[in-house]
Image (cartoon, helix red, strand yellow):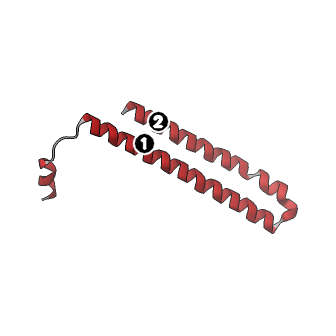
Amino acid sequence: MLNMLALLQEPMSAEAAKNLGLFGAGIGFGLAILGLGIGMGRIGGAIADGIARQPEAAKQIASGPFIIAILLEGATIIALVFGLLFKIIK
């Protein structure tokens, strides 16, 4: 029954396909930024927890996660660039 209903629908216009592409790009951007926020929050929480447990090692604890934060930001920027490219190509 569902397949027969799909046959009765009109084909999607070019404008509707473009709008769906923009909608998908917006969702992708939002998910990338949301993932960055969650990751940075977890890194910051882990640093605060580690410093609270061992205040004398604060310098060593705070210097390590910067590499992870930089990689996380780099992955987010790459995701945003790919989203823009796919939006432009579509």
SS type, badge 1:
helix
Q: Which amino acid does label 2 sit on?
A: Leu
Question: Residue 84, labelled with which disc?
Answer: 2
Q: Quadrant of residue 48?
A: bottom right
Horizontal side of residue 29 vs 74, given as left or right: left
Dot 1 corresponds to which residue? 25
Image spot of residue 47 (x, y percent)? 74, 59
Horizontal side of residue 15 vs 34, given as left or right: left
Q: Quadrant of residue 26?
A: top left
Q: How many marks?
A: 2
Horizontal side of residue 1 vs 21, given as left or right: left
Q: Quadrant of residue 41?
A: bottom right
State the residue lying farthest toward the right. 56
Horizontal side of residue 3 vs 35, given as left or right: left
Image spot of residue 53 (x, y percent)? 80, 68
Image spot of residue 86 (x, y percent)? 42, 35
Between marks 1 and 2, how big is the CA–CA gap? 7 Å
State the residue lying farthest toward the top. 89
Q: Residue at x 48, y 45 (%)?
A: 29
Q: Is residue 17 above or below residue 49?
A: above
Q: Which residue is drawn at 54% across and 53% down?
A: 34
Cβ atoms under marks 1 and 2 closer than 8 Å: yes
Q: Which of 17 and 69 is in front in this view?
A: 17
Image spot of residue 4 (x, y percent)? 11, 53
Q: How crowded is mark 1: few (under 14 residues within 10 Å), some or many (20 or more)?
A: many
Q: Which amino acid does label 1 sit on?
A: Ala
SS type, badge 2:
helix
Q: Of label 1 and label 2, which has the lower sequence position?
A: 1
Q: In which quarter of the image is the N terminus?
A: bottom left
Q: Is residue 1 above or below residue 8?
A: below
Q: How crowded is mark 2: few (under 14 residues within 10 Å), some or many (20 or more)?
A: some
